[in-house]
Image (cartoon, rainbow, N blue to C red):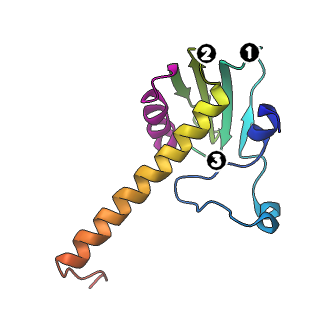
Amino acid sequence: MGEEEIVDQSMTNEGEEAVEVDSELSELDTEKIKMLPGASSDGTAASFQIVDEDHTLGNALRYMIMKNPGVEFCGYSIPHPSESKLNIRIQTYGDTTAVQALHKGLDDLVDLCTHVEDKFSEKISEGNFATEEP
């Protein structure tokens, strides 16, 4: 499968669970992430557009992608406040592609959110705190 095909498939958000069964693939939103025109021919630089997202995902994803030592630059922007679109630009040193860096950043962000949720739940259960609103 080519890297362009990988980008056209839906990627999970930080709150969604990864799909494990192929029959469930038809339920995924294949328009969630698109590669924008102007990517480098060797795949080391590319821009992506993620729909229905804002600064919440943009800043966290940019941070996680920049933690990758193979990434030279990562930045995001919201093109217009009235449109719920997030543009993200990734440039790598050449050991990895921009698509791979995006996938790794998304996976790392999901892992981080899962870890925080697990630790939070653990501390709540240890402290015998009420989990329901009064």
User: Which mark sits nearer the N-terminus, 3 or 1?
Assistant: 1
Residue depicted at x 22% and y 69%: 123
Residue 65 painted magenta: yes
Q: Main secondary structure of the magenta part?
A: helix
Residue on which disc 3 sits: 52
Q: Which of the 4 image quadrants contains residue 85?
A: top right
User: Which mark sits nearer the N-terminus, 3 or 2?
Assistant: 3
Amino acid type, residue under disc 2 in the picture: Gly
Structural distance between the alpha carbons of marks 3 and 2: 30 Å
> From where the camera sits, is residue 52 visible?
yes
In the rendered structure, are the residues bearing label 3 and label 2 in contact, judged by CB atoms less than 8 Å apart?
no
Residue on which disc 2 sits: 94
Q: Which of marks 3 and 1 is in front?
A: 1
On the image, the x and y values in percent for residue 45 come to 65, 18
46 and 70: which one is in front? 70
Q: Quadrant of the N terminus?
A: top right
Residue depicted at x 77% and y 32%: 3
Magenta range is: 54-71
Residue depicted at x 65% and y 24%: 97
In the rendered structure, are the residues bearing label 3 and label 1 in contact, judged by CB atoms less than 8 Å apart?
no
Amino acid type, residue under disc 1 in the picture: Asp
In the rendered structure, are the residues bearing label 1 and label 2 in contact, judged by CB atoms less than 8 Å apart?
yes
Numbered disc 3: secondary structure: loop
63 and 71: which one is in front? 71
Image: 68 above or below 51: above
Circle 2 crowding by C-alpha within 10 Å: few under 14, some 14–19, many from 20:
some
Residue on which disc 1 sits: 42
Circle 3 crowding by C-alpha within 10 Å: few under 14, some 14–19, many from 20:
few
